Image (tube, rainbow, N blue to C red):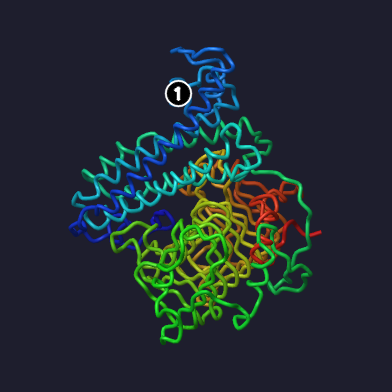
């Protein structure tokens, strides 16, 4: 995100795009035979899955009509379905030649749409992988590697979606309607991130990637629209509504101190065993691996432990990271490393640190000190830090793209772009989050609950913005919900807060969605509450809301008058952004063992 819009720069200061040093770096050697073989296997698997589903669709279509039908003109069902998408021409062109599509019902067109999109993504991944041996400078290589990772993840998400929506899957399908909407939303976010990575580079690789990735975002957007139409989207902007039991929540006094609370349960998707693990003392936890810098463990580095993780683990794998400061080059729990739990010795004791930033000619996505994309990831009692400093601009401490992720009792410390809540469903509890510009950003469906959010002193002439949510499509079930938190200033900002206004957030993308509920707001919050991104961009399509906040910064009388901003007065509307309804946490959080508030206070 471009910091330059947040305030008048110093004289002779340059925008982020201009301050990056220019240098060339030869690309690493081309793809190995092993990596080529892997890519070919992935592409072959996509074709086999798509062909199997296509055969089912074709048989279904024939059974309905008694014969194979060949038409050039789209059917009424296709025309009707495509009229509900954001890109109807592309929808018509992509669907009507698919086997069986002419005779397909509206419901059949859901899996046909996903099937077509999956095949296009698979082809794009295969073609993009083929240019790995081209010469690239460091920034281009960074963007290119992001895209390959994100494309492969999207192929996986689309494959799961296709299996879930295909005919005859029944109860054995791997996901329900909210799962599918989450996976499709994440695939669109992945593609958006890939495209943005190339925004500040130029050259042959960028041009080739643009051609290979053409229409992918629009195809996923159409999938979301078709799916939402058939499965019902009965809320105001795509927020899922499910009736769940409400629970009591903790509250804060006028200084932001917890004064009451009688609930230590966690959302239901957290298993009983995981709940016990999250609250158990370290001495009572039987770790599968122990990382210790002094050699008194299984490994001396976190990277070694990650390498030993099995792929697609079905049981909880625990890595205990003993107290110490760990600064390693690449720390990422990838998509295949599922159900992994990191346990530290506490905030400020176990520290995972890094200093990467965009000033080193890399993408924001690449700067994370620690990243996790494997489903079911949990971290507890750890500090994640990026020490690059405000002058280095975008520098991520923690990036999460894992579904059903839980971050519990952790410090997340940085300046600009500290916490990247990239995609899928996430829950943060009892964490301390520090930053300056857009320091909680991304497009996950995330609830941040009972956390302390600290605005720090930024660079001269900058403004602080706590959130920058980048929901790009109205059918994405994503957004940032800040619930029962304490939003305050650090001591360095407190001393000069009159010179550095702090805002609750700004809209990064057209359908940005952020809500702050039942939280304590310090007096460092500007009376307007929210900041525009660029003039009138997204002001009538965003959803930024506040519900029953308190403290000196919570008064709404002088808040912005944007069409998309609202003071929420309805309990029913506010409940849509709770753990139970926004991330369906009551179905998965209990298995992790993290305490949570499923609903609003009573």
Residue at 54%, 46% (x, y): give it.
512
Q: Residues within 10 Å of mark 1 (few under 14, many from 20)?
A: some
> Which residue is more in the foreground, 246 or 480?
246
Residue at 24%, 54% (x, y): give it.
32
Q: Which residue is mark 1?
A: 98
- Residue 90 appears at what percent x and percent y? 43, 26
- Residue 15 appears at what percent x and percent y? 32, 56
On screen, residue 13 versus residue 437, left or right, reads: left
Residue at 56%, 75% (x, y): give it.
381
> Which residue is more in the foreground, 445 or 549?
445
Please say if 247 is above or below 352.
Answer: above
Q: How many marks?
A: 1
In the current view of this chain or complex, which residue is farthest to the right? Answer: 602
Q: Quadrant of the N terminus?
A: bottom left
Q: Quadrant of the C terminus?
A: bottom right
> Which residue is more in the foreground, 233 or 74?
74
SS type, badge 1: loop
> Which residue is more in the foreground, 139 or 243?
243
- Residue 62 appears at what percent x and percent y? 54, 17
On screen, residue 279 versus residue 38, left or right, reads: right
- Residue 126 appears at what percent x and percent y? 32, 42
């Amino acid at each position: 995100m471009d910091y330059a819009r947040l305030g008048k720069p110093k004289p002779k200061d340059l925008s982020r795009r201009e301050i990056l040093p220019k240098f060339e770096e030869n690309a690493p050697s081309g793809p190995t035979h092993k990596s080529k073989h892997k890519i070919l296997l992935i592409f072959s698997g996509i074709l086999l899955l798509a062909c199997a589903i296509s055969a089912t669709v074709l048989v279904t279509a024939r059974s309905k009509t008694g014969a194979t039908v060949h038409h050039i003109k789209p059917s009424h069902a296709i025309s009707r379905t495509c009229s509900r998408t954001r890109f109807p021409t592309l929808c018509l062109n992509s669907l009507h030649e698919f086997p069986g599509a002419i005779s397909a019902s509206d419901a059949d067109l859901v899996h046909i749409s996903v099937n077509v999109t999956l095949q296009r993504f698979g082809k794009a991944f295969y073609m993009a992988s083929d240019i790995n041996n081209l010469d690239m400078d460091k920034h281009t290589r960074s963007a290119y590697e992001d895209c390959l990772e994100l494309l492969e993840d999207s192929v996986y998400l689309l494959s799961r979606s296709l299996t879930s929506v295909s005919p005859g899957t029944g109860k054995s399908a791997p996901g329900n309607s909210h799962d599918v909407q989450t996976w499709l939303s994440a695939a669109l976010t992945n593609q958006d991130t890939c495209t943005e990575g190339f925004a500040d580079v130029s050259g042959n690789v960028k041009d080739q990637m643009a051609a290979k990735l053409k229409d992918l975002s629009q195809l996923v957007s159409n999938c979301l629209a078709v799916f939402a139409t058939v499965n019902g989207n009965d809320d105001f902007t795509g927020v899922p509504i499910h009736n769940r039991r409400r629970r009591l929540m903790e509250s804060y006094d006028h200084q932001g101190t917890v004064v009451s609370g009688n609930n230590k349960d966690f959302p239901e998707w957290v298993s009983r065993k995981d709940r016990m693990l999250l609250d158990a003392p370290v001495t009572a936890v039987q770790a599968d691996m122990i990382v210790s810098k002094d050699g008194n463990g299984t490994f001396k580095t976190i990277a070694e432990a990650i390498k030993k993780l099995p792929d697609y683990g079905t049981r909880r794998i625990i890595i205990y990271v003993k107290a110490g400061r760990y600064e390693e080059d690449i720390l990422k729990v990838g998509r295949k490393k599922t159900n992994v739990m990191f346990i530290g010795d506490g905030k400020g004791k176990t520290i995972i640190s890094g200093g990467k930033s965009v000033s080193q000619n890399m993408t924001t996505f690449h700067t994370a000190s620690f990243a996790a994309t494997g489903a079911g990831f949990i971290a507890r009692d750890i500090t994640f830090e990026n020490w690059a400093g405000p002058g280095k601009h975008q520098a991520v401490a923690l990036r999460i793209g894992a579904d059903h992720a839980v971050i519990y009792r952790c410090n997340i410390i940085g300046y600009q772009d500290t916490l990247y809540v990239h995609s899928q469903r996430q829950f943060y509890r009892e964490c301390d989050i520090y930053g300056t510009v857009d320091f909680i950003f991304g497009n996950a469906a995330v609830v941040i609950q009972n956390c302390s959010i600290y605005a720090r002193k930024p660079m001269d002439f900058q403004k602080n913005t706590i959130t920058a949510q980048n929901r790009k499509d109205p059918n994405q079930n994503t957004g940032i919900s800040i619930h029962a938190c304490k939003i305050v200033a650090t001591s360095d900002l407190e001393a000069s807060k009159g010179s550095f206004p702090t805002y609750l957030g700004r809209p990064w993308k057209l359908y940005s969605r952020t809500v702050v509920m039942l939280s304590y707001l310090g007096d460092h919050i500007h009376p307007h509450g929210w900041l525009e991104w660029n003039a009138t961009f997204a002001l009538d399509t965003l959803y930024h809301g506040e519900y029953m906040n308190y403290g000196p910064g919570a008064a709404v009388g002088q808040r912005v008058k944007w069409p998309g901003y609202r003071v929420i007065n309805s309990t029913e509307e506010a409940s849509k952004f709770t753990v139970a309804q926004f991330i369906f946490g009551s179905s998965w959080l209990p298995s992790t063992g993290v305490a949570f508030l499923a609903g609003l206070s009573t």
